[in-house]
Image: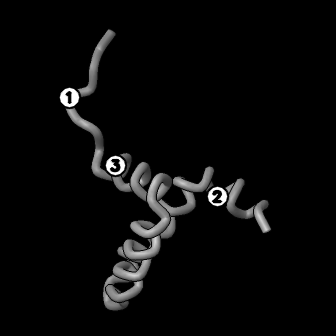
Amino acid sequence: MKHRASVANDEVIIAEIRDNPEFAASYLAAAIEEADEPGVLLIALRQIAEARGGMAKVAKDE
């Protein structure tokens, strides 16, 4: 069995968002502050959606 040498940064962020709501809120607030870089906010939103089960689940939740 092969072991990965490292974990992708994206996976670490998603796990932290999933496990720590305070981090998620701070992370999103920081992304919003980067208004001059819309890609930053889009990445943060994607990571938050993924941490909460993916876009399909997020879209179904009310």
State left or right for residue 47 relative to residue 6.
right
Q: Which residue carries the number 2 mark?
A: 55
State left or right for residue 48 relative to residue 34.
right
In this picture, is 33 found above or below 41?
Answer: below
| Element type at mark 2 | helix
Q: Which residue carries the number 3 mark?
A: 12
Q: Is residue 52 visible?
A: yes
> How is the protein colored in the picture?
one colour
Closest to the camera, between mark 2 and mark 3, is 3
Question: Can you tell which quarter of the image residue 6 is in?
Answer: top left
Location of the C terminus by quadrant is bottom right
| Element type at mark 1 | loop
Q: Position of residue 31 (x, y in %)?
A: 37, 79
Which residue is at a point 45% across and 67% down the rendered structure image?
Answer: 24
Which residue is at a point 56% across and 61% down the rendered structure image?
Answer: 49
Q: Residues within 10 Å of mark 3 (few under 14, many from 20)?
A: few
Q: Which residue carries the number 1 mark?
A: 5
Residue 60 bears which disc, if any?
Answer: none
Q: Amino acid at mark 1?
A: Ala
- Which numbered disc, 2 or 1, marks the residue that appears first in the sequence? 1
- Which numbered disc, 3 or 1, marks the residue that appears first in the sequence? 1
State how far apart marks 3 and 1 are (Cα): 14 Å
